[in-house]
Amino acid sequence: MDQTYDLERLIQQNLHIHTTYSPCAKPEMIARDIVNKAVKDDIRVIAFTDHYNSGDFPILDTNRELKNQAEECGTDLKVLYASELSAYGVGKFLDAPVINEALDYRLYAYNHYHLDYWEHPEDKSPRGYVQHALQVLESLFATSRADCIAHPFIGRFIHCFEDKTLVTKEITDNELGDILKKGKRSQVAWELNVPALFADPEFSKRYWRIGKEIGVVFHLGTDAHSMAAVSTSQHLERLKQLLE
């Protein structure tokens, strides 16, 4: 996807959608119905990004089944058969190279700290989690694995903090700018994760402003687990109020 900061263009993509192959998704999240919903919403490109939280999960097989379902719709919608992959520690990636290379789009989560196999920092303070996150991201950028970073910097999955904005408050503008630059140099995009943007508006404004100053590529995704969440146009006015 091209670099753009035009929100009306960004809402023409939804690059973070879960199907029934993700245990957390609603039973309604069937590929053909998602495709039809996206077409009605004037979305031009979507990505199926089911969780890859186990090395035993047959993501390539499930993506083939999703492709079979989606192609039955006969639309011009571009569909990427992808995955939300796991950078679960410094230099630790759950997906084997053969899996990674076979995906159309590689969306990496590095902050799913609620999962039992995820690496945590020794210093379990907001500062400790910021430093750990930056180290994990740098180790990811040293590879060619990632196309985009999912819901970056959010603290929602760190259960030891009641205030889920403590981590984003802790990261400085200089740290944020530096890691965004490193991602750009590695040709990795950064997700505008709609629920995360609305959950932490002060950080979202910083993230958007600094990202634009640096010239990063943003990808938009709703992290859809339900059919209602597939639509992006429903968020346009609120996104404009938040970011413009």
Image: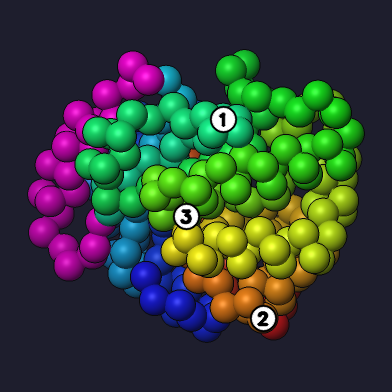
How packed mark 3 is, by other alpha carbons closer than 10 Å (few <14, some 14-19, many 20 or more), is many
Q: Which residue is mark 2?
A: 213
Could you tell which of marks 1 and 3 lies nearer the N-terminus?
1
Count of numbered marks: 3
**Residue at horizontal 44%, vertical 40%?**
84
- One can see residue 242 in this view: yes
| Residue 173 quadrant | bottom right
* Of 111 and 143, the residue lying toward us: 143
State how far apart marks 2 and 1 are (Cα). 29 Å
Q: Which residue is mark 1?
A: 88
Q: Amino acid at mark 3?
A: Cys
Could you tell which of marks 2 and 1 lies nearer the N-terminus?
1
SS type, badge 1: strand
Q: Looking at the image, is 28 positioned above or below residue 75?
A: above
**Residue at horizontal 40%, vertical 46%?**
145
* Quarter of the figure that contains the N terminus: bottom left
How packed mark 1 is, by other alpha carbons closer than 10 Å (few <14, some 14-19, many 20 or more), is many
- One can see residue 228 in this view: no
Q: Looking at the image, is 173 positioned above or below residue 81?
A: below
Q: Can residue 72 be found in the magenta stretch? A: yes
State how far apart marks 2 and 3 are (Cα). 19 Å
Magenta part of the protein: which range?
A: 55-79
* Of 104 and 177, the residue lying toward us: 177
Q: Amino acid at mark 1?
A: Tyr
Q: Can residue 190 be found in the magenta stretch? A: no
Could you tell which of marks 2 and 3 lies nearer the N-terminus?
3
| Residue 171 quadrant | bottom right
Q: Which residue is mark 3?
A: 148
**Residue at horizontal 78%, vertical 44%?**
130
Q: State left or right for residue 62 relative to residue 191.
A: left
